Amino acid sequence: MKLPTEDLIQSASRGDGIAVDQLLERYLPGLEAFIRLRQGKMLRAKESAADLVQSVCREVLEHIDRFQYRGEIQFKHWLYVTALRKIANRAEYYRAEKRDAAREVGSLRSAGSAGSVAPEQILECYGSVVTPSRAFEAREELARIESAFEELPEDYREVILLSKFVGLSHAEIATEMGRSDTAVRTLLSRALARLAGILEKREGGGSATTSKAK
C-alpha cells in the first residue's frame, strides 16, 4: 500500500531507511525534471542534473527532521525551493571561478544524460506542461522541450514551474510573484501558448501541445 507523504516524512525523520528510499523514489522524477528545466545552459554545461538532484536530496534529508508537514504541495515547494537555491549557488560558483571550460570537458557527463531517472520518466513529468511528440526518441524529445523552455522569458518559466511542477494555485503564485490573481492567469496562459508555439515551429507544424492552465 502506498503510504501518505506525511507518514514517509515522519518515518524518514526518525532514520527509517526504507521510508527515505520510498520518499526519494516518489519525488525523484519530478525533482530532476524541475532541475533540468531550471538549471540553464551555463550550469548544464558544467554539472549534470543528476548531480544537482543528488546534492538537493542530501540537503533535504539532512534537515528532514526540521520539516513540519502541512500538505504535499508545501513539501514540494520546500523541495523545489531547495533546488532553486542549489542551482543559484552552483551557478554563482562557476561564474565566480570563471573556469576554463575546455579544461573540464573530460570530467563532465553528457549534458543530455537523465542520470538516475529514465528519460521516459522525465517526459512523463513534462506531460504536465506539454504533450511530448512521438516523432522523436525520448532523449531527443527531452533536449527539444528543454531547449524550447529556455527560449521563454524568465517570468514565463517561473509561472509554469510554480503552477505545473510545484502545484501552487493562482492565488499562491500571485503572492510568490507579486502579481494579481488575474495577471497570473494571463501570464500562465501566454507562457503555455508561447511554449507550444516554439515546439510546433521546431516540429514543422507538428502536434506538440501544452496542457491547460489550472
Image: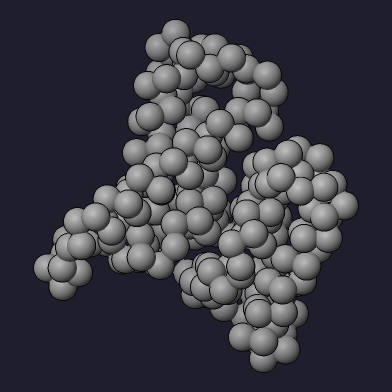
Q: Locate the N terminus and report the quarter of the image it occupies.
A: top right
Residue at 82% across, 47% down: 180
Residue at 54% across, 40% down: 80
Q: How is the image coloured?
A: one colour
Tell me how many marks there are.
Answer: 0
**Residue most extreme to the left:** 103
Residue 76 quadrant: top right
Judged left or right of residue 211, residue 78 is left
The answer to whether residue 213 of the structure is visible from this angle is: no
From what the image shows, is residue 144 above or below residue 88?
A: below
Nearest the eye: 84 or 164:
84
The answer to whether residue 187 of the structure is visible from this angle is: yes
Q: Position of residue 208 (x, y in %)?
A: 71, 75
**Residue most extreme to the top:** 14
Q: Position of residue 107 (x, y in %)?
A: 17, 61
From what the image shows, is residue 208 above or below residue 14?
A: below
Judged left or right of residue 207, residue 117 is left
Residue at 77% across, 71% down: 193
Q: Position of residue 74 (x, y in %)?
A: 65, 28
**Residue most extreme to the bottom:** 204
Judged left or right of residue 80, residue 162 is right
Residue at 45% across, 23% down: 20
Nearest the eye: 177 or 110:
177
Q: Position of residue 127 (x, y in %)?
A: 68, 59
